Amino acid sequence: MHSWRYLIVICAIACTNAQIIPLSNYCRHVHNWCTCEPQANLVRISCLDEYAMILQITDTGNNIAMSYYASGNIHWLPRLNISQVAQFEFDAYNYWPETFFAELLDTLGVEQVLSIQFRDRSIETNEQSKPNKDEYELDIKAEDIGAKNVSTWLFSEVPMLEYFKYESHQRVLSESIFHAFHNLSTLELRLAVHHLPLRLFSSIAHSLHTLSISNPYKFHFQPALLQELQQLRNLTLQLARSPDDQSKQRLSPLFISMPQLEELHLSRATSYVNATMLRGSYNLHLIGINKNPDLSELPSELFHDQGNLTKLDLSRNGLAKLPMDLFNGLTKLQLLDLSNNRLANLSSELFTSLTSLSTLMLNQNSLTSLDPTTFGNVRSLNLVDMRGTQFYGVKLFMPFEALVCTNDDVCQYKSADWECDPQCICWVQRHTQQLSVDCRGAQLKELPLLPHTTLVQTTLKLKNNSISQLPVANGIVGYANVTKLSLANNLLSSLDAVQQLPNNLSFLDVRGNQISVFDQDFINYMTNNTVNLALGGNPLSCDCSALPLLGFVRAQPQRIQDIGDIYCSEWPDRPFQQLDVGELCPSYILLVGCILGGLVIIICLFSVVYLIYQQELKIWLYNHNLCLWFVSEEELDKDKTYDAFISYSHKDEELIGELLPKLETGLHAFRVCLHGRDWLVGDCIPEQIVRTVNDSKRVIIVLSQHFINSVWARMEFRIAYQATLQDKRKRIIIILYKELQHFEGIDSELRAYLKLNTYLKWGDPLFWSKLRYAMPHNRRVLKGQKKHAGPLI
C-alpha cells in the first residue's frame, strides 16, 4: 500500500442558474467508507488509498482538479453531475488503463472538459532514481524507443477539450499519447525527454494553434515533426546546441512549413542560430530569442523575410555586437528589446531602416559611449530605455519628441522644439510618464515655456514666485497639456477658471495668494469638473460673495485638500466650512424670505382670479389658440365620427345656414352631421337618431317653439339626454333660438335640463366664442381635414 497523500480536487461551478445547489447535496452520493465535509464554498471528499477531493463552488466557471493514487480503478467516486468543466487539474501517482479517463469523467457526471492540466507524480510513487548526467546527453533514436518496455500515460477522448498541459518526468513519450484529442487548440508540454516521436502531433495538427515545449535536458528536433502543423500560430520551443554540422542543418527548414505562424518564442532555445532558420516565415509578428548567454552574435540576414515583424525580443543573451544591416527591411517593427546583453557600442546606421520603431530597450548592457546621432533618424521613436548601461556622456541628437530613461525612476524628455528653462529643472517620472517642470523659487513673473507634447502630461511647479496673472489657456504653447498646477505663494488676486485653467487639469494649488473671492463662475467650473484644490492662506472676503465657495466646500469637501486651513479674515479662529450663511450674508436670509413671500402672494392672487373667472379665462385661451393643453378635451371620444350633430326643426333652417359656415371652417373646423344632409334616405328614423347621437361628441339642440312642437326633435333630445346620463359627460349644447311662447308643451326631461344647466342665446355678443368653447377641444388644428362626413351606412 502506498503512503497516504493528500489529493486536491477543485471544482468551481458557475452560477448560471438562479437556484443555488446546497453543498450538502454533493455528499449524498459519497460512499460510507469515504468522508465528505461541506465548508463555506468547499466540499472536502476523501477515500483512503484512492483519492481525496475538494469541491469549490464559485461563479467564475466549472473547474475540477484531481489527484489519483489508487493502484487500480477507483471504486468510490461521487456523482457530481457537472455539465461543463472549464479546468480539470489532475495529479496522478500511478498509471492507469487506456479507458480510465473516460470512465472517470462518466462516473463523476462530467459531460465536457475545456482545459486539462496533468501532472505526472509517478516518480514519487516508484521512488525512481535519476540517471547520471551523461545519460541525458544521448540522442535517443526512434528505433531505440520501440525496443524499450516502459510504462506510459494513456488518455481517452475528452469532449470539447481545447487546452492540455502535460508535465511529466518520463524520458520517453508515447507517439499516441494525444491521439484521442481531436479538437485541441493549445498544447503545453513540460518534458524531460531526449526525443519526440515523428507522429506525435498528427491527430491534432488540423486544430492546434498554440504549442509550447519546455525541456530541462538537451534534445533534438527532426523537421518532419512540425511539418504537419499547418495551422500553428504560436510556437514556444527549447532547442539544444549541437556540435555537429548535421544537427545544424536540422534548424534551417524548421519553421518554413508553418505558413500561419505569427509568434515564435525560442526562450533558452540555442546558443547557435542558423542564418536561414527563419527563411520563408513571412507572417511572423513577434520573435523572441532569449536566455542564451553564449549567443554573442547574429547573422546579418537572419530577419531577411520578416517584413511584417512588429516586436523583436533579443534580451538576456550574450550579444556583444550587431551587424549594421541586421534590421534592414523591418519597417513595421515597433518594439525592439536588446536588454541584458553585452553590447558596448552601437552603429549609427543600425536603426536607420526602423521607420516604425517606438520603443527601444537597451538597459543592462555595457554601453559606455554612443554616437550622438545613433537615434537621430528614427523619428518614430518615443522611448529609449538605457538603465544600467553606464552611459552618462554625450548629449544625444534627437530632433523629435522622445523619452530617454537612464535610471529606474527618472527619464529625460527630448524635443526639437523645446528645452527646459535655465531657471527650472525638468524630468519625467518613468512609471507615470509625467513631465515635471519645477520652477519653484525662480523669481518668475510669468509662466515658463512649455513643450507642445502628446507623449507625456505636464506637472508645473511654480511655488514661491511673483506671478500675478495667468495667461489664457490656449494662448501659450503647452499650457493646455498641464494636468497639475502648483501656484502657491504667488501674487494672484483673481482667477478666471473658464479662460485661464487648462482643460485637462486635475489638481490646482493656489495657497498663499491674494485671492479674496472665488466667484460663482469659478465654482460652476469646479462643479462641472473633477479638479482637486488647495485654497488655504488667501484673504477671503467674508460677505455674500463667499456663499458660492461655502456651498461648494460643504458639498464636496473631499476635493479640498487643505479644507481645515481655509479661514475668513473676520473669523481667524473659525474654519471657513463651519461658518453659517447668516454670518456671511445677513441680507441673504431677508432676500430669500422676500422672494418666497412674493411668490406665495402671486400664487394666491392667481388662484383667486382663476376661481372667479375660470370659464371666461378658458374661453379666451381657447379662442386665441393658447395653452390648449390647459383647455383641451381628453381623447375619450377620438373614435367618434362627428364633432357635433345638430338637432333642429326644419322650420329653423335659416339659423342652420348661419351656423354651418362658422363651425365647419376657420381655425377650429368641426365635423358636423345634419339629418337632412347626412342621413340615408329610407332608413329607419329612430335607428338613425340613435346611431347619430352615439357617433357624435356633441348634440346641438336648436331650441325653439318649432322644436318643441316636433315629435322627432324631442325624440332626438331624449336620446341625447340618456347618452349624457349614461357616460356622465356633458354632450348637449342648447341654443335658445327664439323666445318660447308655450312652456307647457316642453317635456319634463327638457324642462329639468334647462333649470340645471346653462344654455346659449342666439344674439349674445359672445355667442360664437362660447359655442366654440362648448364644442370638442382639439389640441392642434388639422389642416386639410374633411369638413363633414359622408352618409352613415
Image (spheres, helix red, strand yellow):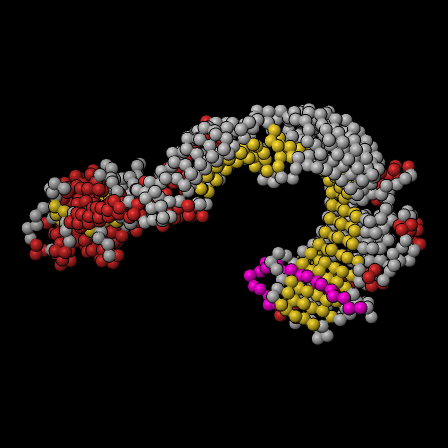
Q: Where is residue 551 shown, x and y percent of the image?
A: 36, 46
Out of 505 and 175, give the one closest to the viewer.
505
Taking the spot 69% from the left edge, 72% from the top edge, the residue there is 35
Can you tell which quarter of the image residue 12 is in?
bottom right
* Membership of 12 in magenta stretch: yes
| Placement of the N terminus among the 4 image quadrants | bottom right
Work out whether 725 lies above or below 615.
Answer: below
Which contiguous range is marked in magenta? 3-23
Q: Where is residue 626 shown, x and y percent of the image?
A: 25, 40
| Left or right position of 513 against 703 | right
In this figure, what is the number of numbered marks? 0
| Left or right position of 454 against 309 | left
Q: Where is residue 390 shown, x and y percent of the image?
A: 71, 34
Taking the spot 73% from the left edge, 32% from the top edge, the residue there is 367
Out of 276 and 739, give the one closest to the viewer.
276
Out of 308 and 343, give the one closest to the viewer.
343
- Asked if residue 756 can be seen in this view, the reply is yes
- Asked if residue 197 can be seen in this view, the reply is no
Q: Where is residue 532 shown, x and y percent of the image?
A: 46, 42
| Left or right position of 709 against 419 | left
| Left or right position of 147 against 60 | right
Taking the spot 75% from the left edge, 71% from the top edge, the residue there is 48
* Membership of 11 in magenta stretch: yes
Q: Residue furthest bottom?
A: 32
Taking the spot 68% from the left edge, 26% from the top edge, the residue there is 394
Task: Name the chief secondary structure element in magenta.
Answer: loop
